[in-house]
Image (spheres, helix red, strand yellow):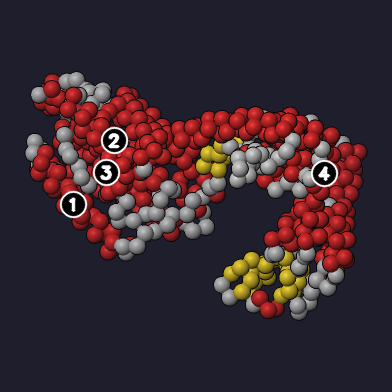
């Protein structure tokens, strides 16, 4: 045990010594950088890259983007980010924040075209040696996006050392992109490279290959090598076909995403409409209340944005649900059996709620910050990327539907709700408090609408008219799927979401909605109770 402790102590000492040596080498290079000539900067950039310091790559990238400065007062090299009043400085070695100063108090580390090329090689070399395969794949993709002949040795060296098959495939495409764009490449090498690009899943490959299929004003190919043109035509056909397929997949994803939003906004309406027969025109305002609840939670948790969206879900459900119970007890319960009067009453109520929100939060739209774990996109490949916020909303909507089904099937409240839906008089005679069920059902539907507002806050700005954009679509989903039927609501939401996304490119967003509305009107003429109508004495009466 003592020998083990000694070994660990020696290793820890060596590690600390190496880290200190790396920082010393980095510090020496940086201290000479502000006053160095362009020729000296070339040597210093290499010294920074070879220092082995953890932030060497960040420094080189800051030089590329023009965010590295030397402070005039003491020559300290710092990162400079734009801020109110000048630049927010950060020590390039330690990462310590140094406050905001005027731009005239610092001098940018400038580079010329030659140094820009050298930096490109150094940064690419760093990224191609990254530990995570995903980072190496992204590095190869960035080379395809901007291929340069000077990167070819780096890519070829990385290929000889790479063992991961996915990374090797990305590197093969990067090498092919460089060969295709290099003027000194021979015809045979270009044909082989074009063949590799033809199998790629990167949109940039289309631009690289299509340059060999360009024609002049007389319709003749600019490229005179016929074999090269034929190879390019074949590769381009494969690439365009593959791109069309992935565009189809992306449209399906956006259609399912829209369907998930419609599912969240409509499923609460399906419950209240199915059980109570109430046409609730204020349902959109329950969505709005949920969205504003999310915004309020973020204001109360400014340092915990990632957690605030999770906290906002139960908060929005409770606030919207209690509002729904209050509306049912004060207004709706006096208007049962009079659907037109409930429509007018809830429409007036929606206007009141909108004005109330304007008075509290102002009429201006509010922006809800998207947490880091929901930002960005998942790049499946170079032709298909799925945004994380929509992906999480799809998963979330199915979780809400599953929880609602479990509530309906496995709890006494769900059993009583279904009993009231099928035969209200019989349920009342069996001792079920139908008035209490009505209030709780309206509250449940309103609470789910509030949860939908949480999801919508991640897709659009929060404003007083947020709910109005979804109320008509929600009613269409409910009518199309079948009043009170959850599976019908799911099917209708996904169907209308996909139909919208596939019709928009051909007909435009407005005409697509009009065509879908016409279809729903014609549909209910034939099937007035929807696709999956619930059967029961109360409903049939």
Viewer-nearest of discs 1 and 4? 4
Viewer-nearest of discs 1 and 2? 2
Residue 441 is at least partly visible in this image: no
Name the residue at 69% across, 61% down.
Answer: 65
Q: Position of residue 20 (x, y in %)?
A: 85, 57
Question: Left or right: 501 with respect to 120?
Answer: left
| Picture disc at residue 539 | none
Instruction: Identify the mark nearer the N-term, 3 or 4.
Output: 4
The total number of labels drawn is: 4
521 shown above or below 307: above
| Picture disc at residue 349 | 1
60 shown above or below 383: below
Q: In whole angstroms, how far apart are the C-alphas of marks 2 and 4?
A: 56 Å
| Picture disc at residue 471 | 3
Name the residue at 50% across, 53% down.
Answer: 305
Badge 4: residue crowd in 10 Å (few <14, some 14–19, many ≥20): few
Instruction: Identify the mark nearer the N-term, 3 or 2.
Output: 3
- Which residue, given by chain and number where applicable, does mark 4 sit on? 184
Instruction: Identify the mark nearer the N-term, 1 or 3.
Output: 1
């Amino acid at each position: 045990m003592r020998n083990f402790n000694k070994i660990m102590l020696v290793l820890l000492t060596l590690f600390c010594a190496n880290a200190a040596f790396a920082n010393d080498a980095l510090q020496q290079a940086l201290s000479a950088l502000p006053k160095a000539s362009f020729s000296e900067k070339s040597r210093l950039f290499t010294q920074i890259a070879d220092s082995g310091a953890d932030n060497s790559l960040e420094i080189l990238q800051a030089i590329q983007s023009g965010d590295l400065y030397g402070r005039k007062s003491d020559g300290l090299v710092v990162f400079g980010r734009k801020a109110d009043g000048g630049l927010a400085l950060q020590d390039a070695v330690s990462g310590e924040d140094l406050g905001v100063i005027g731009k005239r108090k610092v001098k940018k580390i400038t580079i010329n075209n030659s140094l820009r090329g050298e930096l490109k090689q150094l940064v690419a070399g760093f990224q191609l040696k990254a530990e995570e395969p995903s980072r190496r794949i992204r590095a190869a993709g960035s080379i395809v996006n901007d291929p340069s002949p000077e990167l070819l040795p780096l890519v070829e060296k990385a290929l000889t050392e790479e063992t991961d098959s996915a990374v090797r495939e990305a590197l093969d495409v990067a090498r092919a992109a460089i060969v295709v764009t290099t003027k000194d490449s021979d015809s045979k090498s270009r044909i082989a490279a074009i063949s590799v690009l033809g199998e790629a899943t990167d949109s940039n490959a289309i631009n690289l290959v299509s340059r060999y299929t360009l024609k002049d004003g007389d319709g003749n190919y600019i490229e005179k090598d016929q074999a090269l043109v034929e190879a390019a035509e074949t590769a381009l056909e494969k690439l365009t076909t593959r791109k069309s397929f992935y565009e189809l997949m992306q449209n399906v994803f956006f259609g399912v995403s829209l369907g998930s939003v419609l599912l969240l906004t409509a499923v609460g309406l399906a419950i209240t409409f199915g059980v109570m027969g109430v046409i609730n025109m204020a349902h959109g305002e329950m969505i709005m209340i949920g969205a504003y609840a999310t915004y309020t939670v973020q204001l109360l948790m400014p340092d915990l944005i990632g957690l605030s969206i999770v906290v906002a879900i139960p908060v929005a459900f409770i606030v919207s649900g209690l509002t729904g119970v209050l509306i049912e007890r004060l207004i709706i319960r006096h208007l049962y059996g009079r659907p037109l009067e409930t429509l007018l009453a809830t429409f007036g109520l929606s206007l009141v709620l909108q004005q109330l929100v304007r008075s509290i939060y102002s009429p201006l739209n509010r922006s809800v910050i998207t947490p880091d774990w929901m930002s960005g996109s998942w790049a499946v490949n170079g032709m298909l990327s799925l945004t994380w916020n929509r992906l999480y909303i799809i998963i979330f909507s199915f979780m809400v539907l599953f929880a609602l089904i479990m509530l309906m099937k496995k709890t006494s409240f769900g059993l009583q709700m279904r009993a009231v839906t099928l035969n209200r008089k019989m349920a009342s005679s069996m001792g079920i408090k139908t008035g209490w069920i009505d209030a709780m059902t309206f509250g449940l539907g309103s609470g789910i609408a509030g949860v939908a507002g949480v999801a919508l806050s991640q897709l659009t700005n929060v404003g007083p008219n947020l709910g109005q954009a979804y109320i008509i679509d929600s009613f269409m989903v409910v009518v199309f799927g079948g009043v009170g039927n959850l599976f019908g609501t799911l099917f209708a939401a996904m169907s209308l979401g996909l139909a919208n996304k596939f019709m928009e490119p051909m007909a435009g967003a407005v005409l697509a909605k009009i065509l879908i509305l016409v279809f729903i009107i014609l549909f209910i003429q034939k099937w007035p109770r929807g696709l999956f109508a619930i059967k029961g004495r109360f409903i049939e009466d």
